Amino acid sequence: MKLRANRQDFILVDGHSQIWGELAALEEQGEIGDENGKIDETQVKNNLIMGGGTRYPVKRLCTLWRSKSWRPLITKFCGSAIGRSTFNITTFESMLSYRIDNVSIQPK
């Protein structure tokens, strides 16, 4: 992670799933978040070195990260090959806003 943060060329663009994975790794190591696992945008930008020309939806990333029901799901999804290639922060944040995690089917 530190090598990626220190590279001089910005030819290699990090995908949303890679950013999520790095955030999960930092949280697992105890380098980011407070005692409740909450993070803010400044922590994300500082720890993941999100400067340069590439723009990420950091607010949306933090919104997803704060969701107790979506965080483990997204972490597991980004661990799969299909998740690494298709994960998009904006799309998942949109799904979060629909509250589909609160839906349950009641038997008749």
Image: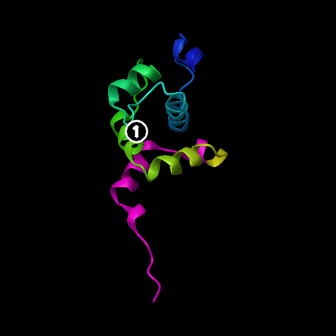
Is residue 48 or residue 107 the one in the foreground? 107
Q: x and y percent of residue 34 in the render? A: 38, 31
Residue shown at 48%/44% (left/top)? 88
The quarter in which the N terminus is drawn is top right
- Name the element at disc 1: helix
Examine the rendered structure and indicate whether residue 31 appears above or below residue 7.
Answer: below
Left or right for 38, reference 5: left
Q: At 41% from the left edge and 41% from the top edge, which residue is drawn?
A: 65
Give the crowd class for mark 1: few <14, some 14-19, many >=20 residues within 10 Å.
many
Q: Choose between 3 and 31: the one closer to the eye.
A: 31
- Is residue 101 magenta-colored? yes
* Chief secondary structure of the magenta portion: helix
- Residue located 39% across and 24% down the image: 45
Residue at the farthest front position: 35
Examine the rendered structure and indicate whether residue 98 appears above or below residue 47: below
- In terms of image quadrants, where is residue 54? top left
Q: Position of residue 52 (x, y in %)?
A: 42, 17
Residue beneath the point at 55% across and 31% down: 25
Q: Position of residue 21 (x, y in %)?
A: 55, 35
Question: Seen from this angle, which residue lies furthest right?
Answer: 81
Q: In this view, does 66 lie to the left or right of 18?
A: left
* Residue under numbered circle 1: 61
**Relative to 13, is 52 on the left or the right?**
left
Q: What stretch is highlighted in magenta?
A: 83-108
| The C terminus lies in quadrant | bottom left
The mark total stands at 1
Residue type at mark 1: give it: Leu
The stretch drawn in magenta includes residue 72: no
Q: Where is residue 27 in the image (x, y as percent from the top left)?
A: 49, 32
